[in-house]
Amino acid sequence: MRSMRTTALFLALGVAVAVPPAFARLDGDEDHWCGTTRGLLAVATEVHHSHERDRDMSREDPSADGSQEKAAAYNGVQAVGDIAVLEDDGTLFIQPNPVDVKGEGIRYTKSGKGYQVVKAPSLLDDPPAGERLDLGDDDVRAVSFPKGFKFTFFGKKYTSMLVHSDGNITFNTPDPASSERSLQRFLNGPPRIAPFFVDLNPETGGAGSGVFVSMSKTAATVTWYKLPQFGTTQLSTFAATLDKTGKVTFSYGDLEAEEAVVGIAPGDGGNFRLTDYQGELPLAFNGAIAEVFAVETSLDDMAIANLFFRHFADQYDHLVVYEDFFQQLLGGGAFAYEFSVKNDIRGIGQQVFDGSRAAGSHGRMGSFVQMGNIGKYPDDPDRTFLGTNTAMDVLGQETGHRWLAFLRVHNPNNADLLGRALSHWSFNFDSEASDMEGNDIDDNGDGTFTTVAATSRFSALDQYVMGLRSAAEVPNMFVIHGGNEPSNAPQIGVRMNGTREDISIQDIIAAEGPRVPSSATAPKNFRMAFILVTKAGEAPKPGSVEKMERYRTRWMEYFREATDFRGTVETNLIPR
């Protein structure tokens, strides 16, 4: 279906750069609320470009609703003090994309370093052939190919596959159980074949349902047969056939589930293309290829940035965005998130890249911060309300993701400092109660340790990464081996056993290299714009701008305090 295929499941953003696997738990609870992971820029950029392609098609469609003309006549941006109020101009929302591959087939054939995608007949067996796998909810089983059968996928050969209950196959690594089956997880996990990536539950299927595998000397077929989407009675049947030649064929029967990611991905991020299997095939591409089906609208974050820069100067390091309406973020699982748009700093655990042009900037903007509905935050910006976080701590974490937390220690493959999604500090790292999901940990001197504070500042190490402190000004740190689960959310008053390892800044520099530019020349003042987005034809709700103004003014004070008065923030609006 041609309508907006980049829907509410999309998750986040990033340019076409390869990134390490990032498995985030995005349950929307108080423990794990931040949706920031590595590789968000690539997703956001392609989501935006796909959205633009759809809008270009609507211009050519005589049945279009006139939204392009409305956008051309739009004049809904205003500065209310130093809050930028952006009324939707018809470009900010991505429309639902209903499932439209029922009864059809899709075939991926190797073409150079990538694949050519074409329509194909659906070749489902009913009932399915083969052996029924004993799979439960969020489950996976390893299945070996027959002797002599090696399946080539994105240039690598495999002798086995990992079959997941939730409509996909991975290689090498099983994908951790998660409540979100998102485009971001699809892209940044292991190599993946996803005929219908959605949360399916074989445990509640009826008689004869299940996941079946049939093998021959030349092909392996996995069939997900009459499986219900988790928590529903919506049944779906589909299959993936892996041919010894490297060809992959998806076949579809009845599909009652209303949302899914459908496609193939080499894993660990990289290039990808969002497509419309009904309107854009045949298609050849070197990288991941997918269509996202969903029933809800989603926001195009890059469109928000572009709208802002059409009216205000390109002089901002961060855009801090709130909405004056409820909109699920990242497929419904995130409270807030950030994606870096540009990085020109070395030695902080990130690659150097520049995706600012897609955001409407010309090299200045570094970070897009999506805070969600302003109404979900307390009136008092300093009241603890989300786990150990105040509204200012939340803002500290999201703006801090421009630099943090991606550092390794000892060598580039050692992630002892890192916790959830490899983009937050480990629960077991004494990070001085860093806003980046950090704990302050006391060593009790008897082999036990206690967390005594959490998420309240930028630590000395944070400040080094931010360019506010030299390496010589970072004291030694420690991490606990065998303590708690590293990805756990910060918590005060937790006592744990473990072995202490002392870490110096030189251990980190040995893994990441020195920070370039150093603190001697790195900027200490950062310009951030505060933006409130409203729906088309709607003014801000009573009190929303006033709340944001309290947040804006308090944020400037908080940032100075949290950085030990080494950094400052300017938030005034500058017209274009």
Image (cartoon, grey):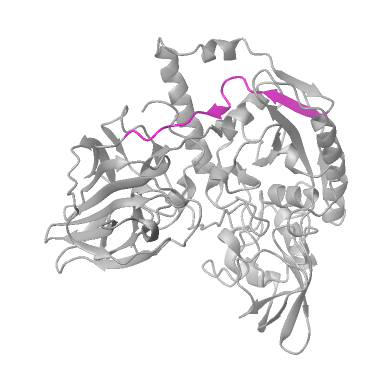
Name the quadrant of the C terminus. top right
Q: Main secondary structure of the magenta part?
A: loop
Question: Is 336 drawn above or below residue 365 in the view shown?
Answer: below
Name the quadrant of the N terminus. top left
- Rendering quarter of residue 254: top left
Residue 54 lies left or right of residue 312; in this view the side is: left
Outermost residue to the bottom = 446
Question: Is 7 drawn above or below residue 27 in the view shown?
Answer: above
Residue 291 visible? The answer is yes
Q: Nearer the viewer, residue 367 or 223?
A: 223
Outermost residue to the left = 217
Q: Nearer the viewer, residue 535 or 350?
A: 535
Residue 360 visible? The answer is no
| Residue at the (38%, 50%) spot, across then down | 228
Residue 420 lies left or right of residue 534; in this view the side is: left
Q: Position of residue 303 (x, y in %)?
A: 58, 28
| Residue at the (70%, 65%) spot, across then down | 490
Q: Nearer the viewer, residue 287 or 532?
A: 532
| Residue at the (57%, 45%) spot, across then down | 332
Residue 412 lies left or right of residue 335; in this view the side is: left
Residue 90 magenta-highlighted: yes
Residue 263 lies left or right of residue 536; in this view the side is: left
Q: Position of residue 511 (x, y in %)?
A: 58, 67
Residue 407 magenta-highlighted: no
Magenta-colored span? 82-100
Q: Position of residue 213 (x, y in %)?
A: 22, 60
Question: Is 237 drawn above or below residue 176 in the view shown?
Answer: above
Q: Position of residue 172 (x, y in %)?
A: 35, 65
